[in-house]
Amino acid sequence: MKTPAHLYQSWAALLLGLLCVCSGLNCAKGSSGPNAVDGVIYPEHFRFRVTVPDNDQQAPSGGWRAVCIHAQVKHGNSDAKTLCKFEVGIPLRTKADGEIPLEEAQFAAAAMANRAARDVLSRAHPGDMYSVLCRDFINTYNAMLDAKYRGALVSACVTKGIETVPFGYKVGEEPVP
């Protein structure tokens, strides 16, 4: 059973995520380095599918949801672009957080993705390889999401049966990696 303090923390996290995503796109537009970073991924992009049901309520944690994102990465106004492909997995329930509602998982996943993208891409240098930037993004994003929900994972897309969601391009117009 969640305590009132735990519910307050959950709502505060959701509100911060919502403000971050909706405040003039400042979550992903801005910089902590020399480069401006444009674009924002929204909670709706995280169309999680339950891959492991939470069948044992006596266990300290349980269940798993995941989605695969194919995000286009572009270099400024040039035609240089590629896809950064990553899977986001979040437990359905953890010992520390209790049940993690879908909407809360989506808001957290989006807010952390935007922060990680801004952090990594704002400090990119001309000539940096996209594969290195994608790997750095995935590592940064994984650390942020795991800090929020212990056990959450950002990795290569490997889980069968989850949705692949395009971000930043139209299906059929994928850039060559």
Image (cartoon, rainbow, N blue to C red):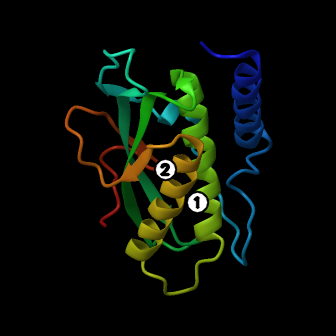
Residue 58 in the image: above or below residue 51: above
Which residue is depicted at the point 70% across and 30% down? Answer: 14
Residue at 61% x, 33% y is: 107
Q: Residue at x 70, y 40 (%)?
A: 21
- Mark 1 belongs to which amino acid? Ala
Spot occupied by residue 123 in the image (x, y as percentages of width and height)? 64, 76
Q: Amino acid at mark 2?
A: Gly
Relative to 95, say whether 30 is above or below.
below
The residue nearer to you, when weighing 118 against 90, is 90
| Quadrant in the picture for residue 96 | top right
In terms of secondary structure, where does tag 2 sit? loop
Q: Which mark is residue 39?
A: none
Mark carried by residue 117: 1
Residue at left offset 80%, top offset 41% = 23
**Residue 146 % position (x, y):** 51, 48
Task: Name, please, the residue furthest toward the bottom.
Answer: 127
In the foreground, 146 or 155: 146
Q: Position of residue 173 (x, y in %)?
A: 34, 52
In what quadrant of the picture does the C terminus appear? bottom left
Q: Give the CA distance from mark 1 to mark 2.
A: 13 Å
Look at the image and tell me in which quarter the N terminus lies: top right
Disc with the residue nearer the chain's start (1 vs 2) = 1
Looking at the image, is 172 positioned above or below residue 3? below
Is residue 39 shown to the viewer in this render? no
Q: Which residue is mark 2?
A: 168
Pick out the residue farthest to the left.
160
